[in-house]
Image (tube, rainbow, N blue to C red):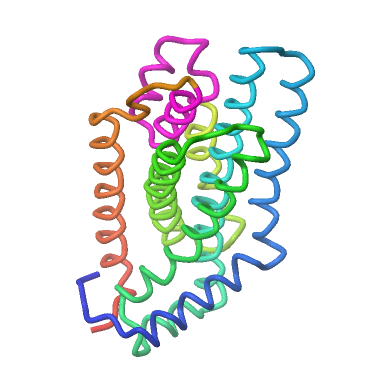
Amino acid sequence: MTMKAIHGNKLAAVTEMKLKALFSKNFIIMPVFAIGLTFVMKLVYGTVLEGEAGIFGKAYALAYGALMNICMTGVYCVSAALAEEKEKHTLRVLMTSSVNGTEFFLGSLIPVILMVEAVNALLVPLAGVTMDAAGWAIYLGISLLAAIAGAVIGMIFGIFAKNQVTASTVTTPIIMVLMMVPMFSRLNEMLGTITDFLFTGIMMHTVENIVDGSRNPVSVSSLVILVGEILLAMGIFQVVYRKNGYDSE
């Protein structure tokens, strides 16, 4: 997938198509699950925890909801949507038409990133967490980078998957790792170490640090890791994309 000129009308057409797919009954349920999880966990923590513990309980509810949203919407939905296009042969039609690889890539990323960001923003008041302007900026910034990483990973798996069933099968292990390792990182030192190198783990730590009032909710090293994972994922996708021969000349 070489960088080519981007035509606004073609990019808009691909973006609109992808956005409609995200709002279909097969995929819209994923961000709804994230919203539901956050609400339920807030109720649970609000019932069993009080005072400062209750505040961090809300932070956990927000972090877990955001992780689920990034993984299920960002990874699974992108993968399944791409696999569906391959299954119905619409991807081949797009790739052999005047839509180039760059337009397809950006058109696939923009809708899911917007949806992930919108839902993650909604989760903050839903979880009962309060943030100042700086906290919001950092939270949404890290959420944006994590959404990009998740979406590109979803595209990689989507290229490999032959259909939606296969997409679900191949993405399940990586989604479990991305979600469960950060969630249980406090119970095991090794899991804690691994979490520091996962974009979902960085997202969770950022939420915790914002609620804790840390002056530096996200470290420079975490940002380097996060950006590095995005670049690595994009590089892998480029190789897979070229190997599968979907790019137009």
Q: Is residue 156 left or right of residue 45?
A: left
Q: Decide which of 180, 123 is in the foreground and name it.
A: 123
- Snapshot quadrant of residue 48: top right
Q: Height in image: 171 above or below 185? A: below
Q: Residue 14: where, in percent of width, then height?
A: 45, 78
Q: Residue at x 67, y 36 (%)?
A: 38
Residue ranking furthest to the front:
132
Quarter of the picture containing the C terminus is: bottom left
Q: Residue at x 59, y 39 (%)?
A: 124
Q: Residue 214: where, in percent of width, then height?
A: 39, 21
Q: What stretch is highlighted in magenta?
A: 182-211
Q: Residue 203: where, in percent of width, then height?
A: 44, 34
Q: Decide which of 41, 181 is in the foreground and name it.
A: 41
Q: Residue at x 44, y 41 (%)?
A: 133
Quarter of the picture containing the N terminus is: bottom left
Q: Residue 36: where, in percent of width, then height?
A: 73, 42
Query: Number of marks in the image?
Result: 0
Q: Height in image: 201 above or below 35? A: above
Q: Residue at x 52, y 44 (%)?
A: 71
Q: Is residue 142 left or right of residue 80?
A: left
Q: Height in image: 237 above or below 65? A: below
Magenta stretch containing residue 124, yes or no?
no
Magenta stretch containing residue 203, yes or no?
yes
Magenta segment's dominant SS is: helix
Q: Decide which of 208, 157 is in the foreground and name it.
A: 208
Q: Is residue 59 left or right of residue 147?
A: right
- Snapshot quadrant of residue 151: bottom left
